[in-house]
Image (spheres, rainbow, N blue to C red):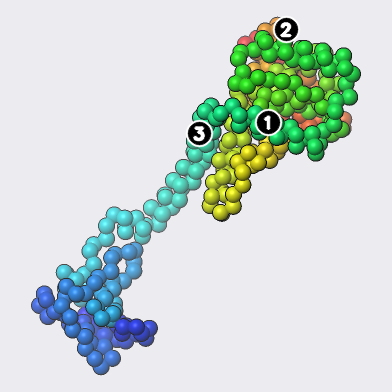
Amino acid sequence: MAKGTAFAAGESGKHEAELYVMGETKAVLTFGGKSVECALNEISRSERIGNLPLQLRFPDGELFIPNNEAELPYFIQAKKRGWLTRLESSKTAILSSIAGALLFMVAFFYIGLPGISTGITQVLPEEIPMAVGEHVMSQLDERMFTASELDAERQQALNERFDALVEMLPPMPVKPKLVLRNWKQGPNAFALSDGTVVLLDPLVNLAESDAQLESVILHELGHVYHQHVMIGLVRSTLISVSVAMITGESTGVIDLMTGLGVLAATAGYSRADEEESDQFAAKYLSTIYGDASAQAEMFTLLGEAHQASGMSQWLSSHPDTQGRIEAANTYQTE
């Protein structure tokens, strides 16, 4: 005989109850002045879940919960806890699982997601980076930039030198092109996913030599060569699309990537991307001029402009300026 609590079918009130097992074929449940009989094989038994008590359900809906499961015959008792149940009840296992999940998320973000983004970028149809770049440029022209105020002769010379630099470089994933614009917010330059390199008038005017300006152009061409722009957009889009799927909100992928592209163009790249583009520029500056000192000189000019007016946007989006100056000065000896 086992004592416990019983619930009548369709009722929430609980009763003190007793369960009697007759041999291995019959069970009798008594509670509230009545008895319920049935064959043992008609009683359903709850599965073992954590520390929840065993529940015995009778065919007409009555429920019995024993006070002490050990009072029941062994063939009625719930099965022993399996390894999964033991894990569910183990604080060490729970904490270890949480730590493992966090490590997995960190590894996915820093290793998996960049790898996936790079792989996707390499197989994307060329129409996508072209469309995104065109949309981003149109948005920047509409909201931020005005036509370049450099004289026609200077613009022509810059375009010719840009084309000459591209000819010296390895094949690009997209054909680069130079766009000149004016912006009152200070020196800046950036690349878009379609290969467009944008130079703003304040940065052109800041450079004291062609080599210094070419160091910036080559840096931006490094972003084009390594597809930093598109990889960053794909990575951001993957995150945004995942959130959209979870929340039920959706939008056009091109429109989404365009918005992210405007943000990326004004916010800069990751430190690793910047270092890779710095090395790209230093390599080809050294090939052309014998060293990368012009790159260090340009960093210095941008730093001085930033300190004087706080308007050097290109430098403010590129961290650790002194370290980059030192790297450029030492590249010629590597």
Distance (Cα) linking label 2 and label 1: 32 Å
The mark lying in front, picked from 3 and 1, is 1
Disc 3 marks which amino acid?
A: Ile
Quick check: 108 left or right of 195? left
The quadrant in which residue 57 appears is bottom left
Q: Residues within 10 Å of mark 2 (few under 14, many from 20)?
A: few
Distance (Cα) linking label 3 and label 1: 21 Å
The quadrant in which residue 258 appears is top right
The local secondary structure at tag 3 comes to helix
Q: Is residue 324 visible?
A: no
Residue extending furthest toward the bottom: 33
The local secondary structure at tag 2 comes to helix
Q: Are marks 2 and 1 in contact (CB under 8 Å)?
A: no
- Residue 282 is situated, as x and y percent measured from the top left of the image, at 68, 15
Q: Which mark is residue 296?
A: none
- Residue 249 is situated, as x and y percent measured from the top left of the image, at 59, 52
| Residue displayed at 24% across by 72% down | 44
Q: Which residue is mark 1?
A: 133
- Residue 54 is situated, as x and y percent measured from the top left of the image, at 28, 71
Q: Between residues 217 and 93, which one lies in front from this camera angle?
A: 217
Quadrant the N terminus occupies: bottom left
- Residue 248 is situated, as x and y percent measured from the top left of the image, at 56, 54
Q: Which residue is mark 3?
A: 116
Mark 2 or mark 1, earlier in chain: 1
Residue 83, compared with residue 328, is above or below; it is below
Disc 2 marks which amino acid?
A: Tyr
Quick check: 109 left or right of 291? left
| Residue displayed at 78% across by 28% down | 188
Disc 1 marks which amino acid?
A: Gly
Q: Which residue is mark 2?
A: 289
